[in-house]
Image (cartoon, rainbow, N blue to C red):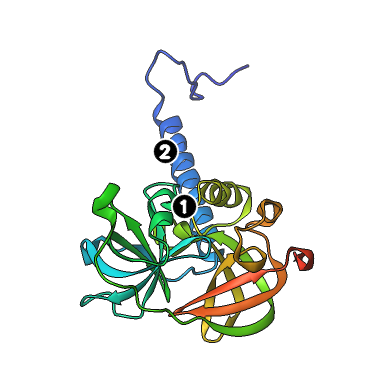
Amino acid sequence: MSDENKPFFVGYLQAPGALRRFLLATCFLFMAAFAALGLTLGVAQDDPGPGAFRFDYGRQTVTGVIELTPYPLVRVTEGNDRIKKGTTLMLSGSGKSSVDARAIPLDGKLAKVSGVVLERGDLNMLQLRGGKNGISGVEGDAPEQEKEPLGRWKLAGEICDGKCLAGAMRPGRGLAHKACANLCLIGGVPPVFVSSQAVDGSEFLLITGPDGVALPVSAYDNVGQFISLEGDVERRGDLLVFSMDPDTLEVLE
């Protein structure tokens, strides 16, 4: 014989008191479990260090020599209180886009550049404003900029896109991280190699193909993976440039 006092849920009626207490307790436990899971996953991630769009710096405008590596850089010759003379800034457009069309005609020339700084450690990028407000030639002869060869290196680390790494996004891992980085690289954002061991004091190196050509498309398959590479390193101001040898690429993970 059934117990007439046993609580029973009917969808169109108010839940009995005993069942309400059970449902509230179950919901609380689920919320606590998901919160604990989220906290555990967050703590387990590597600390990427500080990196962000530095809107707190305000719009930055400096003058320097445009160089193609083939990715556009500016070697600052007239800085300001925030960006010092001798700083080398990688250049990008808004979103996942390059500034090649605007920078190529100014290669080797003096230019004024203006935009928002992205900064992570000693890695610096400037997201340019649109059109001539972002980059324009200026009068005067461009001073010669030194390039210091540092020899051939074998490095272990990861290829990333320089914009998200510099602070546009928090560095991630896995398929979503790789897909996002590849979209940036396809758009022409400068690629960066994050070395597991510092090279001449820096763990971030702008990476190119052999002899300073664009990163080989074949390397895109290994973006976001832990790999080893050999290649030549040179210093341009405070930025290192790593010209990879594609034949030496080896996946380590």
Crowding near pointer 2: few (<14 within 10 Å), some, many (20+)? few
* Residue extending farthest top: 12
Q: Position of residue 191 (x, y in %)?
A: 54, 60
The image's mark for residue 24 is 2
Tell me residue 52's x, y (percent). 36, 62
For badge 1, the amino acid type reads: Ala
Q: Secondary structure at mark 1?
A: helix
The residue drawn where x is 28% and y is 52% is: 129
- The quarter of the displayed image where residue 139 is located: bottom left
Question: Is 70 situated left or right of 74 in this image?
Answer: right
**Percent coordinates x, y for residue 65 in the rendering:** 36, 70
Name the residue nearer the viewer: 150 or 24.
150
Q: Looking at the picture, does residue 231 appear above or below residue 133?
A: below
Q: Is residue 219 left or right of residue 93?
A: right
- The quarter of the image holding the N terminus is top right
**Between 202 and 60, which is closer to the camera in this rendering?**
60
Pinpoint residue 15: horizontal percent, then vertical percent: 41, 24
